Amino acid sequence: MSAETLSLIAGAALSLAFSYIPGLHERFAALDPTHKRLVLLAMLALAAGGVYGLSCLGWGLAWGVVLTCDRSGLAGLLEQLLLAVIANQGVYAITPPRPSLQRRGI
C-alpha cells in the first residue's frame, strides 16, 4: 500500500469514525461546523506529527514507516497530510447526517 493510499484511507476513516461511532458522534455533533473541521484537522496533524516524531527517534523503520527526518521527509509528510485532509473533508461533506440518539428518544 502506498503512502498516498494510506493517507487517503486514514483521512476518510477518521471522518467516518466521528460520524458514526456512538458517544464520539454525539459529542462531535454538538460542535458547530467550523469547530468540527478544526477538530478533524487537528487530529490529522497530530497523527502526522506523531509519525514524523517516530521517524526522527529512529523507531519509524521498526513500524514500517519509511520517512526521513529531514527537510525532504517533512515535505513528503506535509504532502501526505494534505491528501488526508482532502479525503477527510470530502468524506465529511458527503456523509449523511446521523440522527442523534437523544433526538430519537433512546
Image: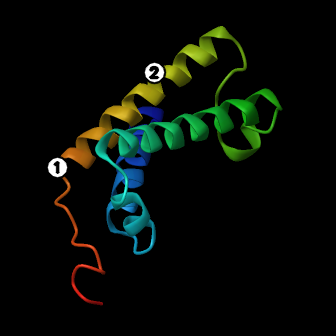
Residue 59 in percent (x, y) is at 79, 39
Q: Is residue 13 left or right of residue 53?
A: left
Give the camera-side residue of 72 and 85: 85
Give the camera-side residue of 99 and 63: 99
Task: List the residue tagged with mark 2.
Answer: 79
What is the quadrant of residue 87 in the picture?
Answer: top left
Residue 12 in percent (x, y) is at 34, 48
As drawn, the residue found furthest toward the bottom would be 106
> In the structure shown, which secondary structural element does the residue marked by tag 1 occupy?
helix
Who comes first in sequence, dot 1 or dot 2?
Answer: 2
Query: What amino acid type should be assigned to the residue bearing mark 1?
Result: Ile
| 82 shown above or below 74 | below
Give the camera-side residue of 66 and 71: 71
Residue at x-position 46% and y-position 44%: 39
Query: What amino acid type should be assigned to the residue bearing mark 2?
Result: Glu
Question: Coloring scheme of the render?
Answer: rainbow
Classify mark 1: residues with Cα within 10 Å, few (<14), some (14-19) or many (20+): few
As drawn, the residue found furthest toward the right would be 57
Gap between marks 1 and 2, in whole Å? 23 Å
Q: Is residue 97 left or right of residue 45?
A: left
Residue 71 in percent (x, y) is at 65, 9
Residue at x-position 41% and y-position 26%: 82
Instruction: Using the image, tell me which numbered label, if any, was put on residue 68.
Output: none
Q: Is residue 56 left or right of residue 97?
A: right
Task: List the residue tagged with mark 1.
Answer: 94
Residue at x-position 67% and y-position 30%: 52
Classify mark 2: residues with Cα within 10 Å, few (<14), some (14-19) or many (20+): few
Residue at x-position 20% and y-position 55%: 95
**The N terminus sits in image quarter:** top left
As drawn, the residue found furthest toward the top would be 71
Q: Is residue 14 left or right of residue 104?
A: right
